């Protein structure tokens, strides 16, 4: 507790701390809620996982540029209550975006009061999520200056992910390849199609824009009436293809089963979630998207699900060195569940294309 209070005082000079408690359920950074004796405002203190986010200076500068730009957009639109509608970064006493204690990196933001998140996915919340993430991309479509940096290089780059997968197949470190040759063949059968975004980008036909890169419903804050306040968790916000963000939501929210469902009968693609999210998303995003980006939105659902299949299977072949597992075949179970979801998305693909064509 004394150590944390000393960190707090690197941001809030002489602050009398009333309570510091673990906050949220994030799996990457360690987050604390800070209450003071002297004021009603509360704060969020985070220890940044610098093993994942290796360039903390780039990370924090990205977040500041994003929040500053969104805040200005909201102010220009006449919005009020800005401290609830975007993150407020608290600088250190020497006006830095983070504090380094010779071992760990720390940052602080103002806690957004009277806000809540939802875990359950319904068509209603999918619609709100679509609007929120579409609006997030729309507000950042004209962010000035140099492009933002990649906080995790090649995070949604399929060519890079396939290269890592093929290395795992080649090495077969855990001696498991013999059991999954059919899955490897299924991945390779789709590989050329799944790398089309990178090819179109190099040809100048597909732009990169600022993506959130973790488009889950629990990365939005709602007010007491159920209205979206803002998008949070901006660590992975960086340049990418808009269909990747779209597909990221579809992979998680559009799955009728669990990510690692042992019963593949439970796993299929939920078209109601797709339709609701798409309606909300295009209400906000169609004003800045190019025709090819709109057309390729359903491809994003295939792409990100396929990407996750390759990542889980690569980790299985490597001997479970990246993802936490609960039992020896966990990564294989995850792979099979995600591949079943991919197959279901492929079955609905024409319907998804037709639905979007009708909307626009």
Image (cartoon, rainbow, N blue to C red):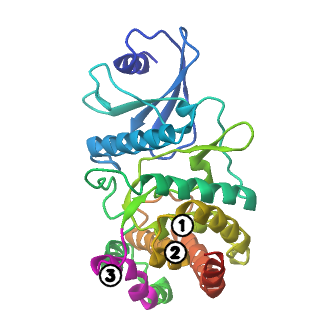
Residue holding disc 1: 286
* Residue placed most toward the observer, 346 or 176: 346
Q: Is residue 226 visible?
A: yes
Image coords of residue 90 (percent x, y): 40, 27
Q: Nearer the viewer, mark 2 or mark 1?
A: 1
Residue wearing tag 2:
294
- Residue in the foreground of this view, choosing between 289 and 259: 289
- Quote the CA–CA distance across marks 2 and 3: 17 Å
Instruction: Tell which of 207 and 19 is nearer to you.
Output: 207
Q: Which residue is mark 3?
A: 199
Q: CA distance from mark 1 to mark 3?
A: 23 Å
Chain-order first, disc 1 or disc 3? 3
Q: Which numbered disc, 2 or 1, marks the residue that appears first in the sequence?
A: 1
Q: Which residues are magenta?
A: 188-207
Q: Is disc 2 in contact with disc 1, using a CB cutoff of under 8 Å?
A: yes
Q: Residues within 10 Å of mark 3 (few under 14, many from 20)?
A: few
Where residue 106 appears, as percent x and y from the top left, is 36, 31
């Amino acid at each position: 507790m004394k150590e944390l209070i000393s960190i707090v005082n690197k941001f809030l000079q002489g602050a009398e701390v009333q309570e510091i408690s673990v906050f949220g359920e994030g799996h990457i950074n360690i987050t604390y809620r800070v209450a003071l004796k002297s004021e009603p405002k509360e704060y969020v203190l985070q220890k940044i996982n610098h093993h994942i986010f290796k360039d903390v200076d780039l990370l924090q500068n990205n977040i500041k540029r994003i929040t500053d730009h969104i805040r200005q957009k909201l102010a220009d639109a006449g919005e009020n209550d800005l401290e609830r509608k975007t993150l407020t970064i608290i600088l250190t006493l020497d006006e830095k975006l983070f504090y380094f204690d010779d071992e760990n990196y720390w940052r602080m933001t103002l806690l957004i009061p009277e806000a809540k998140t939802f875990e359950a996915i319904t068509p209603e919340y999918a619609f709100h999520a679509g609007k929120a993430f579409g609006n997030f991309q729309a507000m950042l479509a004209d962010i000035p200056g140099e492009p933002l940096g990649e906080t995790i290089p090649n995070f949604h780059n399929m060519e890079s992910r396939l290269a890592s997968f093929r290395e795992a197949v080649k090495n077969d470190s855990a001696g498991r390849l013999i059991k999954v040759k059919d899955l490897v063949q299924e991945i390779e059968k789709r590989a050329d199609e799944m790398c089309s975004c990178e090819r179109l980008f190099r040809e100048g036909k597909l732009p990169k824009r600022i993506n959130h890169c973790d488009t889950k419903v629990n990365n939005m804050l709602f007010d007491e009436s159920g209205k979206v306040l803002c998008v949070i968790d901006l660590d992975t916000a960086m340049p990418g293809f808009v269909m990747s963000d779209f597909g990221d939501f579809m992979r998680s929210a559009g799955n009728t089963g669990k990510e690692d469902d042992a019963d593949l009968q439970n796993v299929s693609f939920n078209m109601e979630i797709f339709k609701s999210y798409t309606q909300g998303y295009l209400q906000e995003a169609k004003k800045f998207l190019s025709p090819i980006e709109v057309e390729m939105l359903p491809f994003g659902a295939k792409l990100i699900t396929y990407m996750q299949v390759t990542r889980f299977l690569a980790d299985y072949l490597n001997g479970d060195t990246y993802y936490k597992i609960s039992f020896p075949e966990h990564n294989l179970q995850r792979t099979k569940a995600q591949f079943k979801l991919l197959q279901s998305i492929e079955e609905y693909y024409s319907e998804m294309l037709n639905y979007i064509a009708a909307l626009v």
